[in-house]
Amino acid sequence: MDELTRIEHLNKQALGELAGVASDAALRDWRVRYLGKKSQLTAMLRRLGELSLVEKKAVGARANEVKAGLEAFLAEKEQALSKARMVSLAGDEALDVTLPGRTPPVGRLHPVTRIIYEISDIFASMGFQVLEGPEVELDYYNFEALNIPDEHPARDTMATLWVDYEKEGGQRPMLLRTHTSPMQIRFMEKTKPPLRIVVPGKVFRYEATDATHIPMFHQIEGLAVDKGISMAELKGTLYEFSRRFFGKDRKVRFRADYFPFVEPGVEMAIECAVCRGSGCRLCGASGWIEILGAGMVHPRVLERVNIDPKVYSGFAFGMGIERLPMLRYGIDDIRLFYGGDLRFLRQF
Ligand code: YSA
């Protein structure tokens, strides 16, 4: 067989095999065999020098032509294989099944929700039942039953968002609850002592905002009624809460305060996390941030729900929830919780 016949034979064989190639690995194999350094074609081109001038011209030209042809078919085959990897869907749509998958964005709980769960767990472990109550409330539960009748000056401390103020025609005024305390009444109307509950939830006040005040915030109400409950149980419970939430080294301050539904009343403050007591913008230079109001349930409140104050006594508290993570992490503006800035929210 002369060289030209051998080239044609080789070309036919190479093209025949290429048609049957169905994978990248088989294609790599084919390339080595027919176009690689040790292929017959390369060997033929190397042997050209041994041929006569006339043969050299004819064989050389045809060998290069076949080589170029095979390279072109190789490129075509490469493209066809990569296209085959795309599963055709409909029309122009295509799906490259070899692409890495996209990670779906996964949401997470809002920091305030997480704190509510954490606080509720702490109180639950101390024997308190966790429940919720309505955000749209009757004036009766929000004020009247809590010993805050109409025209009582204490109403001014909780600027109210009214839903319905019609007093005529039997309609009872409704509002967005200004605190979680109405749940004290709702629960005691149905359940007699001994009882211990905490009630987390949203509250609303028509208030200007600043670094520690917003018009919609969260509180958690606490109520314990039993025989022989005293101020010692109130302080013990709140100290224990602070120790578990902030750690044993954080300073706590109790001061006398006034709320119409307790007697006596107190407020509890925590040492400011930002300045550690030396005074800064967040704590208004006082070194303390108030987190809750509390006290011994007023006898008149107990009487209203038919619990005899001569037999039973109780303590109650209402804690502002947003201020707790502020005090734990040193967050210097309460508005950050509701600004929707994911750079802030993702840190929790
Ligand atoms: C008092 C005695 C009880 O027996 C039971 C509950 C209470 C608390 C009372 N119901 C109350 O709401 N008191 S308060 O108006 O002083 O608010 C309690 C806490 O809510 C505050 O200490 C503060 O931590 C938070 N708070 C009040 N206004 C806020 C606020 N947090 C953010 N923005 C506001 N605008």
Image (spheres, grey):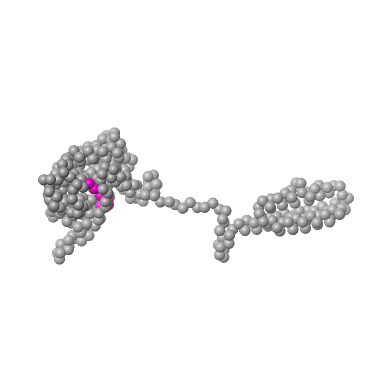
Q: Is residue 207 left or right of residue 79?
A: left
- Say which quarter of the image contains residue 19: bottom right
**105 and 315: which is toward the camera:** 315
- Say which quarter of the image contains residue 15: bottom right
Query: What residue sits 24% from the left and 48% below the top?
Result: 197
Is 201 magenta? The answer is yes
Is 325 magenta? The answer is no
Q: Is any part of residue 80 visible from this angle?
A: yes
Q: Is residue 259 left or right of residue 32?
A: left
Taking 20 as reference, is 294 above or below it?
above
Taking 261 as reference, is 242 above or below it?
above
Query: What residue sits 20% from the left and 50% below the top?
Result: 184
Q: Main secondary structure of the magenta part?
A: strand
**119 and 40: which is toward the camera:** 119
Which quadrant does the N terminus fall into? bottom right
Q: Is any part of residue 182 visible from this angle?
A: no
Query: What residue sits 15% from the left and 62% below the top?
Result: 167
**Looking at this rendering, what residue extends furthest in the left direction?**
310
Which quadrant does the C terminus fall into? top left
Residue range (magenta): 196-203
Q: Position of residue 118 (x, y in %)?
A: 32, 44
Q: Position of residue 25 (x, y in %)?
A: 66, 51
**44 and 87: which is toward the camera:** 87
Query: What residue sits 55% from the left and 65% below the top?
Result: 90
Q: Position of residue 132 (x, y in %)?
A: 26, 52
Q: Position of residue 130 (x, y in %)?
A: 27, 49
Taking 76 as reference, is 317 above or below it?
above
